[in-house]
Image (tube, coloured by chain):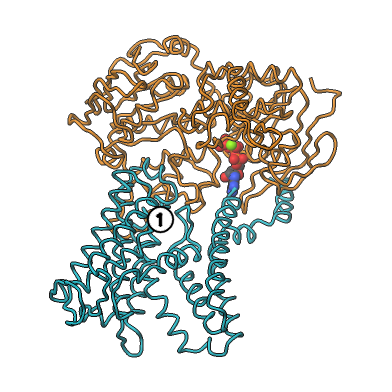
Chain colours: A cyan, B orange
Amino acid sequence: MASSDSATARADHKQPHGLGSFVRSQMRNIAPFLTLIFLSAFFAIASPSFATLDNVGNILTQVSVTGIIAVGLTFVILCAEIDLSIASIANVTGIAVAYFTLQESYVNIANVPMPGWAAIVLALALCALLGVVNALGLTMIGIPSFIMTLAMMQIAAGVSALLVRGQIAYKVPDLITTLGSGSIGGVPWIVIVAAVMLLGGHLVLTYTRFGRYVYMVGGNREAAEFSGLNVKLILGSVMVISAVCSGIGGMLGVAHFGSAQQNEFDTYLLDSIAAVVVGGTSLFGGRGGIGNTIVGLFVLGVLNNGLDHVNIDSFLKILIRGLILLAALIINVYAQRLRERAAE
Amino acid sequence: MSQGRSPILELNQITKAFGGVEALRGVDFSLYAGEIHGLVGENGAGKSTLMKIIAGVHPEFSGRFMLDGRETRFRSARDAHAAGIGMVHQELSVAPDLTVAENVFLGNQPTNRLGLVQWRRMAREASEQLARFGIHVDPMTRLGDLPIGLQQLIEIARVLFSGARIIILDEPTSALSPPEVERLFTTLRKLRDEGTSIVFISHFIEDILRVSDTVTVFRNGRKIAETASADTTKGALIEAMIGRGGEALEHSYTDDLMLPQSGGGATVLKVDQLSLGRSLQDVSFEARSGEVLGIYGFMGCGQLELSRILFGKLKPDGGTLAVDGSAKTFRSTAAARRAGVALVPESRRAMLFHQEPVYKNVSISILDRISALLLKPIRERAIAQRQVEQLQIRPPVVGLDLGMLSGGNQQKVALAKWLTYPPRLLVLCEPTRGMDVGAKNDVINIVRDLRAKGLAIIVLSTEPETVLSLADRILVLKRGAVVREFAGEAVSKDRLLEAA
Ligand SMILES: Nc1ncnc2c1ncn2[C@@H]1O[C@H](COP(=O)(O)OP(=O)(O)OP(=O)(O)O)[C@@H](O)[C@H]1O
Ligand SMILES: [Mg+2]
């Protein structure tokens, strides 16, 4: 033993394990956080109106709808699947809840008025149903989620189009109006809903058996199957969760924007995916979580909001967002490799 | 044979630690041209780690590394490859989505002057090379569609024929059956005679003694002994490996072994006329409580498929399956698990979560028994800790990521998954693959314990020793059909090989 101890001491000396490998394995959590701090500092220096309490409130409100949708998407991406139908499902659910609400007489939509609670239940049922269709396509027929949800994106858009026929609806049930555009004690309800849903998602993923299954299925699907998990049921569930979160985001979004119309949510597809991925949740599944998504949401929120404060050409803004997203994707893929190397 | 010549590879005082785990402590190792150098040692002794250092996979270590008499440092596996060092890793590292031909030429596909891959030439040369090695497959099939043993052979072939002058084989025979092992040894001897240096790691001490010129023994990260193979014996090597007498562990199963007369208790599993494509034909048998049924056969005899059907991963084309007297058609592995069937597949990668800690790997299959809705991490860790201690998994730290355990210890974790709440029927594919002699013995004892508890156990293996050391009754499977049953009679390695 004695002779080996000196040899070991020398090894510890020479090898940057310990801290080095910790940083490498945690890269996916550290990088997004540093990005957030860097962006916040940059805009705070560049514009005096950025770092104000009011503006923080603005940012929170601006990311709320994306946040609600991104909760479900986080589950899906953790399972190494993707859901491209989130924005369309949000849209059709928002339209549906308006469709079942009595509109003003000048709104030219053949709507079917119902009591508020019924409208909400029907809208939720609709998005859950679309989620079930996604789930069945993925697990029973075996269509890759990328393709299945691409088709669903069209289908949901088609249903939206049929419901509104190019018109715009304005009224939604009172509860939805309150949650979407009201506030309590100066805090917008929509921020509270987003926070509650993010927290709920986090609790489910971290502390429940189902959450563990999600991580394990994402980490190694074959091993999950050989462990006797019902992989199809878990994959199906995350697709439904994603669709329902999108639906809730859609209903509140419609109230928030004050209108329900075709293509209203188109930008939310990219924003939600970006929030999840920028936050560091692995596209290969099994790594990341709601905490990452929250950081990702803030990175996007600060970026979008901050660019408005510094007077940049609005077309350049789109390009800058794209470049930031690209950088995040590179980090995401690279972090996976670093982690594997650290584990070697 | 090595006196007077200078080694082509000479390592001095190599030390390597992973975080707090010391994998190698001051190891000296030299390799000469034209020798086959065997490496033995317990699970976790540091064999793979040393080889990965030589192959440039672990660029960070301390000590002196001399290649051709000059001090060298590889920064990556690519550097090592360029210097003529090829390695077959313990964990299969093929590209399952590429074709056989692409795998054979991985990284150096033949290209024309425009830099385009010459597919036709590549396919032809690939099938020529593989044929030299006794493998006849269509070079354009997707590699992942082939049985795991064949994948392993193809990976070996790739390295053997890559022109490397130093070839490292880390447990290359673990998925092979005797005829393939023979072919491999013939090829190794030929390469050696042509001047190639070969390092060969195996837990089959007899194989090591048969094929290598020199043997080095590792224990606990240190080199314990190095001798010419001709000057040592199996017993001596085992003793050096584990540090105590190895008499009990050196059983070689060449002599006849009597299988017990009585055949266990109640029938737990009844399989009738099972068939699946060209893999299985009319397979019928029973597995009984308190009995270990061994199923032996060469690679590709249908064992894999059979185990998958029993666990609900594959659906048979025909035939029936009954557990405890009630007919079952498993629609998922979850259904099979609920019916009391458990499977440990032959591939660790298929069974374990490398990026997750040991305790999550152990608890995943029993999570629904531990917790209804909320996880109980403390309980999970306690359960895992107990399994880790019982199976003597090292290091005994349940919070460590699984990927940091050595191959043999990972295999024990795969078994541990099912032991907390023992199933009715336990199906084990190659349960001792990659395990050292001591660990194999542990597995034998665990299986005997489970048998005493009344489990029905099926052991499927391509290694005669595994089946002989565990089974009370043995079926021989050949091209998808049961061709022989040994029950209550004498059986030996030769008799099994003859039947298969
Ligand atoms: N990437 C890693 N991170 C941390 N520890 C590691 C890593 N790789 C190996 N180890 C540790 O180093 C020690 C030596 O492992 P190694 O894989 O070299 O053993 P081995 O002799 O090849 O065993 P086996 O016969 O089981 O394959 C073990 O204790 C193992 O847990
Ligand atoms: Mg090893």
The kind of residue tagged 1 is: Ile
Q: Quadrant of ligand 1?
A: top right
Q: Name the residue under label 1.
A: A82
- Quarter of the rendering containing residue A335: bottom right
Q: Please indicate whether residue B266 sits to the left or right of residue A184 in the image.
A: left
Q: Does the residue labelled 1 lie within 8 Å of ligand 1?
A: no
- Nearest the eye: A127 or B401: A127
Where residue B176 appears, as percent x and y from the top left, is 52, 23
Residue B194 percent location from the top left of the image:
75, 19
From this view, report whether residue B494 is shown above or below residue B323: above
Residue B40 showing in the rendered view: no
Mark 1 surroundings: few (<14), some (14-19) or many (≥20) residues within 10 A = many
Residue A143 located left or right of residue B396:
left
> Which residue is more in the foreground, B175 or B139?
B139
- SS under mark 1: loop
Q: In this view, does B7 lie above or below A187?
A: above
